[in-house]
Image (spheres, helix red, strand yellow):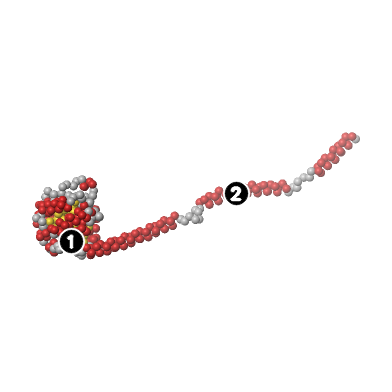
Amino acid sequence: MARVSRRRGGRRRGRRSARSSPRPPAWLKPLLVAVLGALVLAVWAGMRHAPLIEDSAASRPPPSSPPVVYEDMQRLSALRVLDAARRLEREKKSAREQARERERARQAGAPATAGMALILDDVGYDLAALKRALALPWPVAVSVLPDAPHAVRAARMAHAAGRLVMLHLPMEPANPKYRARMDAGFLRADMSRDEVRRIVLADLARIPFVAGINNHMGSRLTTMERAMRWVMEICREKGLFFVDSRTTKDSVAARMAREAGVAWGERRVFLDDSVAPEALATAWEAARVRLKRRQPVIVIAHPHPETLDFLEAHAGDLAGGVLPLPRLLAPGIGLDATAWREGSHERHAVN
């Protein structure tokens, strides 16, 4: 009886314990599984698509950055406008310079004759070269260096060929290298009036048939009014013209000649600063351009073989365009330029 009672008591206690902790509903577990699965799926999807979005954003240019082609086109357009403006300004400047040059020529009494004159400098060393120059179909003026070994003979040859003879008067240069090579025949900046006169008159006495003078070197002396005034005094006394070789832009020689009443001219083109073919062609074209503009242009050349080759090759370029030098000179006061223009310059020769 006692065992049976104990078993029944245990069953009762078990039933009471089971009743005190109720079981969860059957639907809760599937719901939790579904929620967890949804969360896992959402996280996976986010990790998968985030890099694609970042890459796509990085590959697109910033909306505020214009394409490069627009910047280049704008720059090119600006450069074209600037180039056109500069070209127009150069043309205006050229026109103004031409107008000023015409006005200066008018005020100075420069001849209105349009044409080219050619002076051959540094003559008196190479007589064979002089013969070639005298054979050119142009009235080349021959400027003789007074101390050259064949100076007198060269002057006589030029005169016999009907060419104008000039004295190529050595004057002090500004360049120290050339100044160191000066000999006793140069006019120097520190000379007195008497010394200048002595040298110039001695040169004129040595070279026959001289009708005019132009400077040899002289980039220093031609900037000095006093020295050039002394030279022009002699030109006036002897009835000689003066051509400024313009070895410096600061030369006052032409102005001193004009003020002294001396017939004068100015070199416009050095033909052979370089004897390279392209340099000769460029200088020749510069002279032709001035000729086309109906401006007087005095060209200075030298008896280099390359220069003479060039002149012989272009002898037919300017038929009738190369004139006797006096035709392009501004007349002096009281000087008879008619004789020069007719070619009978012997009356002005100093023998």
Q: Can you tell which mark lies on residue 261?
A: 1
Residue drawn 22% across the image and 57% down it: 268
Between 249 and 259, the one lying in front of the other is 259
Residue topped by disc 2: 46
Mark 1 to mark 2 CA distance (whole Å): 103 Å
Q: Is residue 247 left or right of residue 26?
A: left
Q: Is residue 91 left or right of residue 333?
A: right
Residue drawn 20% across the image and 60% down it: 259
Question: Mark 1 Cα within 10 Å, few/some/many (few <14, many 20+)?
Answer: many
Up/down of 215 relative to 341, above or below: above
Up/down of 75 relative to 16, above or below: below
Q: How many marks?
A: 2
Which quadrant holds residue 16?
top right
Please, what is the three-letter code of the amino acid marked with disc 1?
Answer: Gly
Regarding mark 2 in the picture, which secondary structure is present there?
helix
Which quadrant holds residue 340?
bottom left
Regarding mark 1 in the picture, which secondary structure is present there?
loop
Question: Mark 2 Cα within 10 Å, few/some/many (few <14, many 20+)?
Answer: few
Rendered location of residue 58, percent (x, y): 52, 50
Between 8 and 226, the one lying in front of the other is 226
Q: Earlier in the sequence, mark 1 or mark 2?
A: 2
Residue drawn 25% across the image and 55% down it: 250
Rendered location of residue 218, percent (x, y): 20, 52
Rendered location of residue 313, percent (x, y): 18, 56
Rendered location of residue 173, percent (x, y): 21, 50
Would residue 104 be visible to someone looking at this image?
Answer: yes
Would residue 337 be visible to someone looking at this image?
Answer: no
